[in-house]
Image (tube, helix red, strand yellow):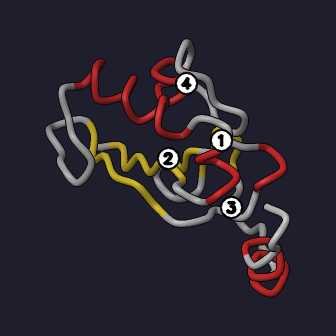
Amino acid sequence: MKKVRVCSGRSCTVFGSKRLMEEIQKQTGLKPGESHGTMDLDWCGCLGYCGRSPNIAVNEATYIFEASPETVMDDIDHGGEDMTGRVIDPENIAAFIDDPLI
């Protein structure tokens, strides 16, 4: 089962995470927080790659950057970048999220 998490952080929201979630819901019949035999779908907080928004995490280690509704299901099935072992500095995320210009 694929664990799919659509980022709900500010940058991803501005760049279309809601449209991504709507397309995934349309294609799978799932709502956030639901699962079936092949997918567990939900929102998640900031993934830390705001410069490549909107982002989706698949099975926690594979990320889809600059996702689009037109290709999101194919990307979930086949794509993504393996982020195993990469670490985000939480202080940088907090500084970005607290930036009043965003």
Q: Amino acid at mark 2?
A: Val
Q: Position of residue 5 (x, y in %)?
A: 44, 51
Contact check, label 3 and label 4, Cβ < 8 Å: no
Disc 2 vs disc 1: which is toward the camera? 1
Q: CA distance from mark 3 to mark 4?
A: 17 Å
**Residue 78: assigned label:** 4
Task: Pick the quarter of the image with the N terminus.
Answer: top left
Q: Secondary structure at mark 4?
A: helix
Q: Callout 3: 10 Å neighbours few (<14), some, many (20+)?
A: few
Residue drawn at 75 percent across, 83 percent down: 90
Indicate the amino acid at tag 3: Thr
Q: Quadrant of the C terminus?
A: bottom right
Q: Earlier in the sequence, mark 3 or mark 4?
A: 4
Q: Nearer the viewer, mark 1 or mark 3?
A: 1
Q: CA distance from mark 4 to mark 1?
A: 18 Å
Label 4 environment density (alpha carbons within 10 Å; few <14, some 14–19, many ≥20): few
Q: Residue at x 36, y 43 (%)?
A: 2
Residue receiving disc 2 = 58
Q: Is residue 41 left or right of residue 54?
A: left
Q: CA distance from mark 2 to mark 1?
A: 13 Å
Q: Nearer the viewer, residue 70 or 36?
A: 70
Q: Hey, which quadrant is residue 85 in on the image?
A: bottom right
Which residue is disc 1 drawn over? 54
Tell me if label 3 and label 2 are in contact, CB under 8 Å.
no
> N-terminal of the two: label 4 or label 2?
2
The dot on residue 82 is: none
Badge count: 4
Question: Label 3, on which residue?
Answer: 84
Disc 4 marks which amino acid? His
Identify the amino acid type marked 1. Pro
